[in-house]
Image (spheres, rainbow, N blue to C red):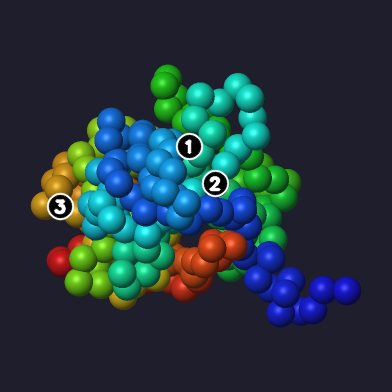
Amino acid sequence: MATGKACFYQDRSIALPPLIEGTLIKRYKRFLADVQLEDGCVVTAHCPNSGSMKTCSKPGGRVWISKSDNPKRKLKYSWELIDAGDSLVGINTLTPNRLVKKCVENGIIDELTGYETVKPEVKTGEGTRLDLMLEKSSGQRCYIEIKNCTLVKNRVAMFPDAVTDRGRKHLEALAELSRQGHRTVIFFIIQRMDADVFSPAAHIDPEYARTLEETMACGVELMIRDTLIDTEKVMLNRAVPFDPSL
């Protein structure tokens, strides 16, 4: 029978697939990465991250990739982690969505308890989907958009790491739902372990930073959590403070 400690970790973590260690040669065309394995072979892995990946895509870095047995995939390998020196960094942008969904369902996030149903990928407008919709039996809803944060400099986590019109539209969708009377949340998951504070990256995308401020003024809630990462799992960790002045 599982111990209480083991259950605690399982309830708030996402297991990673079996990983293969290698060295990053280069990332290119956004979604491709060449990796040299320990036996000297070079493979091309899918990079499941459309951002610029500043501070976590330096050639020569130690990386971990997973291998798929799906015969329909063009690329067998996916890039999962990189060692950025002070921390492992989770590359896969799907991990935060899975992590938050699991933690909500398991009642791990105190601010998001009391909902009976959790629905992913909910369409809220023409061409707009949000990551989660929580609903109570009374009909009360909470819409959540989850963002993967991998940019950290001087222990300050920042988002976005590139200009994101799509991300800004998600904020606008949350603000509109808030004006309609729904509860709304923008949830940043820092997929690394070396940040003490979070700030919008206004120097990279000033429009996103401005829209985030306006969105919060409309009643959209801000949640920020970092993670604990090893080569077996990514686990939801602590709340990280917000400082828009950095």
Q: Where, quadrant-wise, is the N terminus in this rendering? A: bottom right
How far from the left and from the top, in percent, is residue 231? 54, 63
Q: Is residue 95 above or below residue 28?
A: below
Which residue corresponds to mark 1?
Answer: 130
Image position of 76 (left or right of 56): right
How packed mark 1 is, by other alpha carbons closer than 10 Å (few <14, some 14-19, many 20 or more), is many
Q: Quadrant of residue 126?
A: top left
Measure the alpha-carbon separation of dots 1 and 3: 23 Å
Q: Of marks 1 and 3, which one's residue comes earlier in the chain?
A: 1
Say the numbered circle drawn on residue 46.
none
Measure the alpha-carbon separation of dots 1 and 2: 27 Å
Q: Residue at x 31, y 69 (%)?
A: 85
Q: Type of residue at label 3?
A: Ala
> Camera-side residue: 63 or 223?
63
> Camera-side residue: 175 or 227?
227
Q: Quadrant of residue 120?
A: top right
Q: Residue at x 76, y 79 (%)?
A: 4
> So how many labels did they put on this image?
3
- Which numbered disc, 3 or 2, marks the residue closer to the eye? 2
- Residue 198 visible to an observer of this rendering: no
Q: Of marks 1 and 2, which one's residue comes earlier in the chain?
A: 2
Q: Type of residue at label 2?
A: Ser
Do the residues under discs 1 and 2 have CB atoms within 8 angstroms? no
Q: Where, quadrant-wise, is the C terminus in this rendering? A: bottom left
Q: Residue at x 59, y 62 (%)?
A: 232
Say the numbered circle drawn on residue 66.
2
Element on which disc 1 rests: strand
Element on which disc 3 rests: loop
- Residue 202 visible to an observer of this rendering: yes
Element on which disc 2 rests: strand
Which residue corresponds to mark 3?
Answer: 202
Q: Type of residue at label 1?
A: Leu
